[in-house]
């Protein structure tokens, strides 16, 4: 089982360390040959501390035809990677990097942008036969699990119906300089991923990859137990959605801290202490605890 830590807000003095993921060029890594050993074998395991998220927020299993619920497995991580298509909406810094690691880990990928699949020929050629390009609707339709990674100002364009019943990983951050001011976010009345969940009421949204620089997704993963292994946060109102992100993080080489419901996900939003910096599980937990609600 992937290593993860569930985390509860604590009453601690608030402090703030401003910071945002620096913009670095995205490296193209050599593709791993199919005979390479998978990182998932022979993992060392860390003790897992889990909150009873399911009882607090209600656990909903995947639909019967979803890979997430395939088989009668009571394991929290039943996805079989090579049977799963990740539909990616957004093919920029983050979308392309998630696609690279997903393909490397055996997933099929359908990736999309705003301009159309014909503009993604080069990326798809680099990704190889497990990747295809489509429109955002096609990526959503093909997805067993989707990743939404567009500028926040475009979140309302994300197709709703084709994502119904599916887990949707939300990488988005709020930059008013880019996205325009959103009063509810400025006032601390909602969260970035809470807005996407509202837009996708029949999907199960989980926050993921929002506080790591795109380049680090392919360059900074380490096997379980490696002292250099860094932790990333997730958050969801649905246990199977945060479990999926935990599994994906683990496959990509990262530990997980589960913040809990989306209403708490502001703790890892822009300019909070946990945003952008390289952290272990205890460091991330400490940074989440001292995050201020508004900045
Ligand atoms: N860059 C980072 O290091 C980083 C780190 C963590 C989180 N984030 C967050 O993750 C999100 C994506 O960031 P990014 O840096 O990857 O952005 P980006 O490089 O600007 O890429 C955005 C992608 O979204 C596509 N897109 C825009 N509007 C769309 C629409 N209506 N339908 C479908 N696709 C659409 C764009 O397509 P076109 O190119 O065709 O317009 C582009 O492929 C942002 O919210 C960002 O704040 C970024």
Image: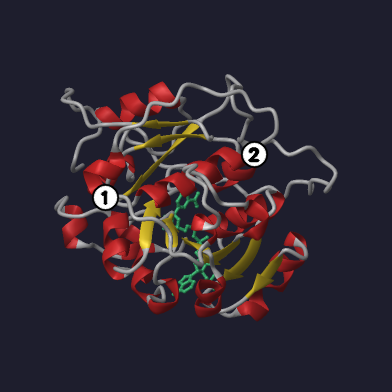
Q: Residues within 10 Å of mark 2 (few under 14, many from 20)?
A: some
Q: Residues within 10 Å of mark 1 (few under 14, many from 20)?
A: few
User: Within the image, what quadrant is residue 220 found in?
Assistant: top right
Name the one closer to the observer, 171 or 109: 109
Location of mark 1 (residue): 58
Is 197 positioned to the left or the right of 228 in the image? left
User: Within the image, what quadrant is residue 115 found in?
Assistant: bottom right
* Residue furthest front as drawn: 72
Name the one closer to the observer, 179 or 150: 150
Q: Is residue 223 above or below residue 60?
A: above
The mark nearer the N terminus, 1 or 2, is 1
Q: Position of residue 49 (x, y in %)?
A: 38, 26
Which residue is depicted at the point 53% across and 43% down? 247
User: Where does the N terminus fall, quadrant-wise?
Assistant: top right
User: Within the image, what quadrant is residue 254 found in?
Assistant: top right
Is 57 positioned to the left or the right of 231 in the image? left
Q: Position of residue 36 (x, y in %)?
A: 82, 40
Q: Please indicate, yes or no, whether residue 209 appears anywhere in the rendered image.
A: no
Q: Is residue 59 above or below residue 258?
A: below
Q: How many marks?
A: 2
Which residue is depicted at the point 32% across and 50% down? 59
Label placed on residue 68? none
Is 226 positioned to the left or the right of 59 in the image? right
Location of mark 2 (residue): 219
Badge 2 element: helix
Badge 1 element: loop
Q: Nearer the viewer, mark 1 or mark 2?
A: 1
């Amino acid at each position: 089982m992937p290593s993860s830590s569930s985390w509860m807000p604590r009453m601690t003095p608030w402090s703030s360390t401003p910071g945002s993921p620096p913009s670095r060029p995205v490296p193209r890594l050599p593709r791993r040959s199919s005979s390479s050993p998978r990182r998932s074998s022979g993992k060392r395991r860390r003790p897992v501390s889990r909150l009873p998220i399911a009882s607090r927020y209600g656990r909903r299993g995947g639909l019967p035809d979803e890979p997430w619920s395939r088989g009668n497995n009571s394991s929290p991580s039943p996805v079989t990677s090579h049977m799963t298509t990740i539909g990616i909406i957004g093919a920029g810094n983050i979308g392309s990097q998630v696609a690279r690691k997903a393909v490397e880990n055996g997933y099929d990928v359908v990736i999309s942008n705003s301009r159309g699949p014909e503009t993604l020929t080069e990326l798809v050629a680099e990704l190889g036969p497990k990747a295809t390009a489509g429109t955002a609707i096609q990526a959503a339709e093909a997805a067993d699990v989707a990743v939404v990674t567009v500028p926040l100002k475009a979140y309302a364009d994300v197709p709703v119906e084709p994502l119904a019943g599916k887990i949707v990983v939300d990488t988005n951050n709020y930059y008013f300089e880019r996205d325009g001011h959103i009063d509810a976010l400025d006032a601390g009345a909602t969260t970035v991923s809470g807005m996407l969940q509202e837009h996708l009421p029949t999907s199960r949204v989980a926050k993921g990859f929002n506080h790591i620089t795109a380049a680090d997704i392919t360059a900074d993963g380490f096997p379980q137990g490696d002292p250099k292994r860094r932790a990333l946060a997730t958050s969801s109102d649905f246990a199977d959605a945060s479990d999926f992100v935990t599994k994906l993080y683990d496959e990509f080489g990262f530990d997980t801290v589960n913040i809990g419901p989306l209403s708490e996900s502001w703790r890892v939003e822009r300019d909070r202490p946990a945003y952008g910096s390289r952290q272990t599980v205890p460091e991330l937990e400490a940074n989440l605890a001292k995050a201020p609600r508004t900045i």
